[in-house]
Image (cartoon, helix red, strand yellow):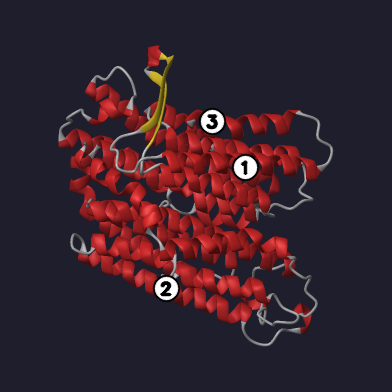
Amino acid sequence: MLSTLILVPLLGAALIGFLPQKKPDTTRSIALAIAVSVLILNLVLGFQFNPTITGFQFAEDLPWIEWIGLNYHLGIDGLSLPLVFLNSLLTLIAIASSSKSIERPRLYYSMLLLLSAGAAGAFLAQDLLLFFLFYELEIIPLYFLIAIWGGKRRGYAAMKFLLYTAFSGILVLASFLGLVWLTGASSFDYEPLRTQNLAVNSQLLLLAPLLIGIFIKIPIFPFHTWLPDAHVEASTPISVLLAGVLLKLGTYALLRFAVGLFLEGWVVLAPWMAILAGISALYGASCAIAQKDMKKVVAYSSIAHMAYILLAASATTRLSITAAVFQMVSHGLISALLFLLVGVVYNKTGTRDVDSLTGLLNPEKGLPVTGGLMILGVMASSGLPGMVGFISEFLVFRGSFPIFPIPTLLCLVGTGLTAVYFLLVINKVFFGRLTESLSQLPKVRWVEHVPAFALMTLIITFGIQPSWVVHWSEVQAVTLLTGG
């Protein structure tokens, strides 16, 4: 079943890419059907998954290139299951929100499905070298998706993304190779490497390149500079996947490998990591306040909110690790919603400049539904009760405060600033008098808001019933910290 989650989008990409399809609508329909199929498979997997079992379920282990220690080993647990589901959901959202008149549709939808397959493989891989292969695979389609279908500076943004993330992969691979060399292991299999008792100094030596590589991917200040450029130049569906899925590869690797493989070394570095999380949260929020491009505001918001996951991981308690997983899901849903709505505003007005927009909440000539959804999305991102953002951030701060009170307070200030910069955007863009230049906006068809309504439904549902997500990862949080 796990291989199916990788092979279906992979074969779908090949089908779309090589079969002659002259009509863009037909190509889009095939991509949608494949994405729906993968999402259904994920739902079936979720119902069959037993959250009370420790360790990996539905494991697949086949010899591959044994002379270098590489095996095709897949497995899923409470840490990876929510992220695999998030990947399939946002892939469907990205395809559904793509323009029907997209240029070179076969290549475009093939790249989207290849991206989905690579992310799923990384979340499911239980061999370190196999994880690295999938970790690097997703760079290729995302590079082309930005470079071909991006904005005016797409070449610069795509190349910057490629260089940063490729260097991230090199550092992660160096850490994995060093681990196998120091332990004398015969393979890169994850579970046997977890049982190796390395000296703390050796763990710290291996953690250094691993953490830098992961911080680039998340990203954490000061390794973040590629993200705003990539978001601004990427099209809306690509920003949805970039923020909702691709950044989670970094946070997943942080928990799975930095904490899971080098726990003693991680505990030594944890106080510094917590301080870095607080700095990154404040930096991201401060930069967001200064932005005039709506997309950049959401991009810097992601930097601040991803820092909460680093804070939770630093605390290394059962509650904080569970909160880190929930924050990944929460941020994925909320950031995807915000990027979708910013995309609608840009498509209808031709600009994302905050100073050029006003009065879009006008019920007759503006974008009232878009504005209403945007206000709800901002409320969720700011952590208002009743939505998933409140639960995830509360769990993070509740789990981290007893261990690191000052960094937690810094992140709490970052949460307060979230309301500031988003309210500034909402006030300028959606309230006020609608100018004459904006009074003849094209109407938003209801189908254009279907993806946003779907995400908003999940944001509210998981805000009211967080246990539907949390129960998947509670047992795994203990396993990760105890090595059980």
The reply, left or right, for residue 76 in relation to residue 21 is: left
Q: What residue is shown with label 3?
A: 4
Seen in the picture, residue 71 relative to 383 is either above or below; the reply is: above
Q: Which residue is mark 2?
A: 384
Q: Which residue is mark 1?
A: 35
What residue is rendered at 38% in x and 27% in y?
Answer: 127
How many badges with numbers are in the image? 3
223 vs 163: above or below: below
Q: Amino acid at mark 1?
A: Ala
| For residue 241, side relative to residue 435 (left or right) | left
Residue type, numbered disc 3:
Thr
Judge by depth and name the residue closer to the eye, 363 or 439: 363
Cα distance in 3D space between marks 3 and 2: 38 Å
Q: Position of residue 163 (x, y in %)?
A: 52, 41
Residue type at numbered disc 2: Leu
Which class describes the residues within 10 Å of circle 3: few (<14), some (14-19), or many (20+)?
some
Mark with earlier residue (3, 2): 3
Residue at point 52%, 78% (across, down):
424
- Residue lying at the far top in this picture: please name it: 67
Image point (51%, 60%), residue name = 458
Q: Is any atom of residue 111 visible in this view? A: yes
Do the residues bearing badges 3 and 2 touch, measured as CB atoms within 8 Å? Answer: no
Mark nearest the camera among 3 and 2 is 3
Residue 84 x, y percent position in the rendering: 47, 42
Q: Quadrant of residue 178?
A: top left
Helix, strand or loop at mark 2: loop
Q: Secondary structure at mark 3?
A: helix
Kindly give the residue lying farthest to the right in the view shown.
22
